[in-house]
Image (tube, grey):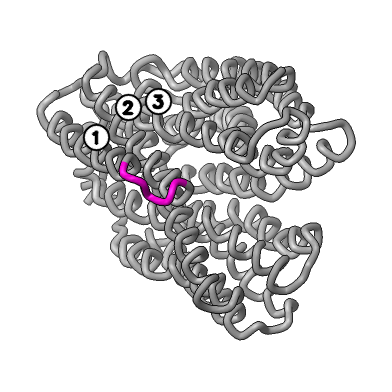
């Protein structure tokens, strides 16, 4: 099938301007994805300097994640309503201002509150690049653009611990937040200059849908994120039940609200979008959660220092950054799903190797094999999946599609962290430490098989 005509075709943007716009947008993408690994390094010093409890310092990270993940469905659609460029600029201004305020936070309570504001800024800007890429690059070059986008996303996790360690060790934890300010200002200038104003594609958004979606995502994310921390007490189950009930109400509302729907049902009439959402959920589940058992095993099980364990993972990030643009370019030329199948298959093999090596207690040098395989698999899975999922959506659905895509990834990540955390905690008291970590590495395999089946059904030029 050929794609259906877009009732609001994308404006003509010349190749040079499109690439300048992408580079400008990637600065903000890098900042928001850098945050977790960057700030995590500073948490011990923050606790000491602000005389914070362990629970309080955990919330410095947790509240950012909540404020970032919960509104993504809404913020993606806001780009359709008010223009992706405008929403991005507002989000970046909020993120940067909050980061500057965090650098001067006098107490842990102030820092937690400001981190929530920073997370909201990140949530406003994060879905917009994917929407803008879909609108300013012709279909034949979107895979290449998504490859660059994926490479930047991969590099954030690689550089976060390094930058954070240097800043905390030399000038103090407050400079971790001050570090964002010049980057934010640069991003604001570049986006204002190079990203074109795109036509707005939706006239209004149903307010009730917004409220119900926030309750749904908040209930599910809070329950999954805080459940292990609070030993799944009654209010955690109540939050989960509320979130799931709100989700049912939300779906019914979307089916009947018409043009103002937050998630238009028409999105899911696009076959590759449906399949890509399933796939990215499994990717989020697997990839965002496995660094913890890997790092715990390398340090506690294999006896490496924190610095040495971190260096063991550097080849993974470097290989992913190098290969992602090439994977994106090949996505434009090869049959849909071909690279994705290789990527998902490689992820499964890498997880099995990690689990097997941890159970067997093999010499630490052998871990470089799954580390390198995981780096290559990341590039071959993320970049093609983003391109194939989004490239055939019409302009009117770009923002909503980006919001759903990013929300699916984040909810998958929260699910993965909860599942792997539970397996590690239960296993450590029953089996040896290495076996507990190895079992955790095998948990994502079943989900990745589902992702593999989904991407195997991608079709060429088949938006429905």
Residue 75, numbered label: 3
Q: CA distance from mark 3 to mark 1?
A: 26 Å
Considering only vertical position in the picture, is 280 above or below 341? above
Contact, mark 2 vs mark 1 (Cβ under 8 Å): yes
Indicate the position of residue 85 as horizontal and vertical percent values.
49, 19
Q: Secondary structure at mark 2?
A: loop
Q: Main secondary structure of the magenta part?
A: loop
264 vs 239, left or right, is: left
Indicate the position of residue 409 as horizontal and vertical percent values.
42, 46
Q: Which segment did they paint magenta?
A: 230-234
Q: Mark 3 Cα within 10 Å, few/some/many (few <14, many 20+)? A: many
Single out the mark in the foreground, 3 or 1: 3
Q: Residue at x 54, y 72 (%)?
A: 436
Residue 74 lies in quadrant = top left
Q: According to the image, label 1 marks what residue?
A: 5
Considering only vertical position in the picture, is 307 above or below 122? below
Q: Residue at x 73, y 22 (%)?
A: 103
Considering only vertical position in the picture, is 392 above or below 17? below
Residue 283 lies in quadrant = bottom left
Residue 9, numbered label: 2
Residue 193 lies in quadrant = top right
Q: CA distance from mark 2 to mark 3?
A: 22 Å
């Amino acid at each position: 099938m050929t794609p259906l005509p877009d009732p609001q075709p994308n404006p003509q943007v010349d190749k040079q301007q499109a690439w300048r716009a992408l580079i400008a947008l990637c600065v903000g993408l890098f900042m928001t994805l850098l945050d977790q690994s960057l700030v995590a390094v500073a948490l011990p010093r923050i606790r000491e300097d602000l005389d914070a409890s362990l629970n309080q310092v955990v919330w410095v990270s947790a509240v950012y994640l909540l404020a970032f993940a919960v509104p993504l469905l809404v913020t993606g659609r806001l780009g359709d309503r008010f223009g992706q460029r405008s929403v991005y600029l507002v989000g970046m201004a909020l993120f940067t201002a909050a980061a500057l305020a965090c650098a001067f936070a006098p107490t842990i309570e102030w820092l937690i509150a400001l981190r929530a504001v920073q997370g909201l800024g990140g949530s406003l800007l994060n879905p917009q690049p994917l929407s803008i890429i879909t609108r300013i690059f012709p279909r034949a070059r979107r895979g290449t653009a998504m490859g660059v986008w994926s490479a930047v996303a991969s590099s954030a996790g690689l550089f976060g611990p390094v930058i954070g360690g240097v800043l905390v060790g030399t000038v103090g934890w407050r400079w971790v937040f001050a570090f964002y300010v010049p980057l934010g200002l640069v991003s604001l200038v570049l986006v204002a200059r190079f990203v074109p104003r795109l036509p707005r594609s939706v006239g209004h958004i149903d307010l009730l849908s917004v409220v119900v979606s926030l309750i749904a995502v908040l209930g599910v994310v809070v329950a999954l994120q805080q459940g292990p921390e609070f030993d799944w007490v009654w209010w955690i189950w109540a939050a989960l039940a509320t979130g799931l009930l709100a989700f049912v109400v939300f779906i019914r509302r979307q089916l009947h609200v018409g043009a103002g729907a937050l998630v238009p049902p028409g999105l899911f009439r696009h076959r590759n979008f449906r399949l890509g959402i399933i796939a990215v959920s499994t990717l989020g589940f697997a990839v965002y959660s496995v660094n913890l058992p890997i790092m715990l095993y390398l340090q506690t099980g294999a006896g490496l220092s924190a610095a040495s364990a971190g260096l063991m993972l550097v080849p993974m990030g470097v290989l992913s950054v190098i290969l992602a643009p090439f994977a994106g370019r090949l996505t434009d030329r090869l049959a849909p799903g071909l690279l994705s199948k290789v990527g998902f298959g490689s992820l499964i093999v890498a997880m099995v190797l990690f689990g097997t090596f941890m159970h067997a207690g093999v010499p630490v040098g052998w871990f470089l094999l799954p580390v390198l395989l995981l780096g290559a698999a990341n590039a071959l899975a993320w970049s093609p999946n983003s391109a194939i999922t989004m490239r055939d959506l019409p302009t009117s659905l770009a923002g909503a599609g980006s919001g759903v895509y990013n929300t699916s990834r984040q909810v998958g990540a929260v699910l993965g962290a909860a599942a792997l955390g539970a397996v590690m905690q239960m296993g450590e008291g029953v089996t040896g430490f290495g076996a507990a970590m190895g079992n955790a590495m095998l948990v994502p395999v079943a989900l990745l098989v589902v992702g593999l089946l989904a991407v195997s059904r991608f079709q060429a030029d088949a938006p429905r």
